[in-house]
Structures are given as structure tokens and as C-alpha cells.
Amino acid sequence: MNGITRRRFLGYIAGLASASSVPLTLLSDPRQAIAGVAYNPGSSSVLKDIEDMINQWSMEGAQRFAGDKLEPSNELQWQRLIDFYFPPRDKTGPVPYCTSVNAANLCPSLRYVDEMVQWVDNVLARDISFPLRGELATASQAYATDAIKTWIGQGASTCAPPCLMALTRNTTEGNNILNNGLVDSGYFNPSQDNVVVWDQNHPTNFQAWKYRKATKKWDDGSVRIIGTDLFAQQPSSNMRIPSDPQSIDPIIKALDTAMDKHTRVVSLSWQSNECGMLLPMGDVVEFIRKKYGNNVHIHADSAQTFGVLDLKLGGLDVDSIAGSFHKWPCGPKMVGLLYMRADNSPAERFLPNNWGYDEYIKTPEDYGYDAAKGEIDADAKRFSYLGQQNDATLVSTWITALFHTGRFHPNVNPKVIENRIAHLGNLTKDALYAGLPQVIKDFKERPYYYIATPTTHASLRSSVFLFKTPPGIDPGSVMQHVYTEHGYAIAALAGLLRIAPTINNTKTDIDNVVKAVIDVIKKMQKGKLPKNIHQRSYA
């Protein structure tokens, strides 16, 4: 089914006659975003069909949800959103629905995202011509990035979106572009400079740095590591952070101890998937800038904050972030985001891993850069030459961004999402505080000893909760039994269980998944369920 028959495909003919009453806000000319790309809006059938779909979805949301203000605790309104925008929870199908409470790893895609992915795949099954794929490239590289720009708080920036971001494959690719590209650019000299990382970073932002150091023979002091005292409220040294700090002071102190005048990069997970801590990034950035100015590149791995927080990058002085659409944004699979701020040319600090072509089948030389002279874009566009990517998922990032900025549900916006997820985090804490004492006798005396996620200060967490199981109860088996016995998807990693709810979850989901965990642990303790059945954990 091609783009021309798309309206019949979804059965939206009746609504399209009035779609023009809900104008779609697009760039007046995609060449504003992609230099040198000729485009005539009047000749595009595929873009017009996508526009029609977006307009129809917008009208549906405006009619259905105008009165739903989405206060964080309004379970009825959030249930209505879930029922409409997410796949139905059908327990009777050939693959019974599994309720995911594991947003830190993977989320169900929004229904409109799935429909767009399927539609573009259908289009490409009929037509893979360069002209048509050029229209899809415009949809992703111009319109999608423009919507993402607004979503991440850079809407006021005068920079064209491709100067600020590249659509990568995932956060892993974005993180590795940094740790693999800063030496060859001449920005980082491992014989005298250092990078500061955190031991609770994702492996692609922690172990990857150690791998570069080992394989490229960097000096011993080139990678400095801020440590974490898990299940503690006080640090054991100035260069360590307790997992439940009583203030932000130990975080800033550890950073101050780790850094010196030779620090060139500070690369931190904004929220850790391994201990659940949400770093006070505004305070971290303010400290670094006051003491070291703009000479330090600040990278915030945002795999656990993109789609969680109202990022407001226009007012946050980070140099770069990396994120994934398949986690908290509930977007398409296998698409990531690498953002680089426009001023101070931070992108030039890193040579790209790939020198290929972009979605327009154009190399840097096609844009006027001389490969023989080592020339390439000075901004984030240099990271976009990745060769052929998945057009269907790239276009669907546009749909994801429009959802998060209120194009479909009129009262959804990044702050509303942030407040809801924070509320879900508080509900998770309450459920764990009610459930874990049933299987851990001294839990109430020292909950911080059993929950790795900060519990004292809500500002230092979102909804990623990691916690211990009782002695003799392996988390991997608990995860497996919770799935097979109760139909919930959670995670087990580093000897802990992890629950991470997001906007596709409700209070009932949280209460039930914690009850499922407690039920499984009790049955394992009584020998009613086997132990040591699942040795592989997914982080």
C-alpha cells in the first residue's frame, strides 16, 4: 500500500475533509533545516499523506481529551490516555499481553508510532525510488528534528535542527561517538588530560571509557572514576557518593575531588539505570562552569531522562546529550538522539566514527566539504552520515515528538510527563515500603540498606527503583517467575531487581507488580517455586 492510498488504509476519509481546519505547523521550507535540498510542498504525495494522518490524529485528541488536564494523580484520565494511545492489553491473543514496568530498558511504542512505522514499511514495499525516499528523508531530517528541537527545550534557538542533533541508532552509538572520537580530533591528550566518569554510568558511558584507555594505551590517570557507596547515606571518601545522600553536597564534593585543571570531559548518566539516582544536573553544570568555565565538555547520558524530564536544554549549559526513543519516549525501536549545543562548537571536539552519507544519500562533499582536506560539518550534522537507516522508524520520531509536545493529546507536554513519572516513582516507593517488610524483617529500620534508589530526597530520583531480594533468593529467578506467573516484565541486574514505571503504567500496575514480586519471593522461600532458573539478567 503506497502513500496515495494511505487514507483508505486507515479508514480516515470521513475526517480528512475537515482536517484543514486544524493546520499542521511545519517548516515553511525544509531547506531551512537541510541546506541544498530542493523541495516543493505542492508535489509531495507522501508528505501530504503524513500531514493528513497527523491532522486527523490531532482532531481525534482534541475532541476526546480536551477536558483531561492530566494531573499527576488523576488515574482515570491517565487510564483513558493509556487505553487510547497504547496497544490494548489483550490477555487472550496468541501472545498474551505482558505488562511492562521496565521503562529503563524498553517501552511499548505509542499506537500512532506503530501505525506510522507499518505505513512507511508498506510504502517502501511498493516504491523505493529516490524521489519518494527523499520525501521520507525530509519528514525525518527536517520535520521530525524540528519537532524534537521544541521537545527538548531548544525551540527558541535560531539554529537549524540538524546543526543541533543527529538521529543515531541508540544511546550506545551516541555515547561511543564521544569516547571514541575525542583523541583523534586533538581535543584530548591522554598523556596529560583526563575525563571524569561515574561508576553508576551505563556501561557505554563507563566501561567503554576504560576500554578506550586500555586499547589505546592512555595514561593511568586519564580516566577518573567517581565511586558510589551503595545502600549508604554517607560517603566513605570525598570521591564517592552514597546511594541515599542526605543532600546534594556529597555529589558536588565528589565531582570537585575528581576534577582538576586537566579535566577535559565530564561524562555522567543524568539518571542511572543501575542505582536509580537522578543527578542534580543543573547544580553539577553550575559548579563546573563556575570553576572551570567552558573548557570542559559536559556530556549528560540521557537514556534515562529523555522522555522523562522536561529537559529545557535551552537553559541548561550541557554540551551534549544522548538518548533513545525506544525507552521512556515510547517511540520507535532502534533510533537514538545525539544532541550537541550550537555555541562554542562542541561537536568539533569529536571526530565522527562514520564518514558515509545521510538520509538524502549525500556525503559531506555533496555539501561542499573537501574530504581530501579533512573537512566536515562543524556541528552535530557531522554525526548524521551513517548510511542507510530505517526510514520507517526515523519518520516515526516525528510522531513521538508531536505526542510529547501536545499535538495529539492537547494537554500532554514535557512537564506533565515529568510530573506523572515522578508521581509513579512515589507510588513505587510506597508500594515497596509496604511490601518488602513482608519478606525482609529489618526493612523498616533501614530501608536505604535494601533499596539502592535514593529514598530520602524525591528530587534525586524519578521512577527507577532497584532493590535487594532476601538472602538465598536470586533476582534473576524472581524476574522470571514474575513474568511467567503474573505476566509482568521487570528487570534483574547487578544482583538487584528493578521496577521502572512510566506513562503506560497506572497505580494498579505498580501495586500489582510489587505484590507479584512479594508473592514470588514467598513461594521461593517456601520451596513452591524453583530457584536459580534464570542466570542471565537484562539491564
Image: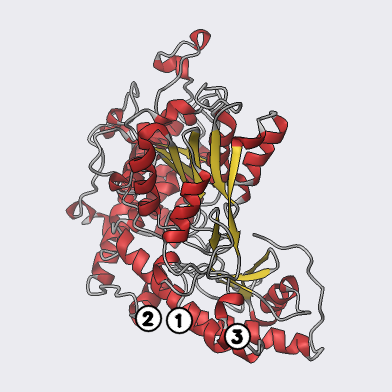
Q: Secondary structure at mark 1?
A: helix
The image quarter containing residue 416 is bottom left
Colour scheme of the rendered structure = secondary structure
Q: Amino acid at mark 3?
A: Phe
Q: CA distance from mark 3 to mark 2?
A: 29 Å
Q: Is residue 149 left or right of residue 520?
A: left
Taking depth in this image into account, of 256 and 196 the one nearest to the observer is 256
Q: Secondary structure at mark 2?
A: helix
Q: Amino acid at mark 1?
A: Lys
Residue 15 image offset from top left, x and y in percent: 27, 60
Can residue 46 be seen here? The reply is: no
Q: Secondary structure at mark 3?
A: helix
Instruction: State which tag comes first along the sequence, 3 or 2.
Output: 2
Q: Is residue 58 left or right of residue 205?
A: left
Point out the frontmost of discs 3 and 1: 3
Compared with residue 471, is residue 178 higher up or lower down, i.e. above or below? above
Compared with residue 481, is residue 379 higher up or lower down, i.e. above or below? above
Q: Is residue 110 left or right of residue 65?
A: right
**Residue 443, numbered circle:** 3
- Tell which residue pokes out farthest to the left in this image: 21
Compared with residue 138, is residue 11 higher up or lower down, i.e. above or below? below
**Mark 1 lies on residue:** 507
Residue 141 image offset from top left, x and y in percent: 39, 36
Point out the frontmost of discs 3 and 2: 3
Instruction: State which tag comes first along the sequence, 1 or 2.
Output: 2
Taking depth in this image into account, of 219 and 213 the one nearest to the observer is 219
Q: Are marks 1 and 2 in contact (CB under 8 Å)?
A: yes
**Residue 75, numbered circle:** 2
Residue 246 image offset from top left, x and y in percent: 45, 70
Q: Amino acid at mark 2?
A: Glu
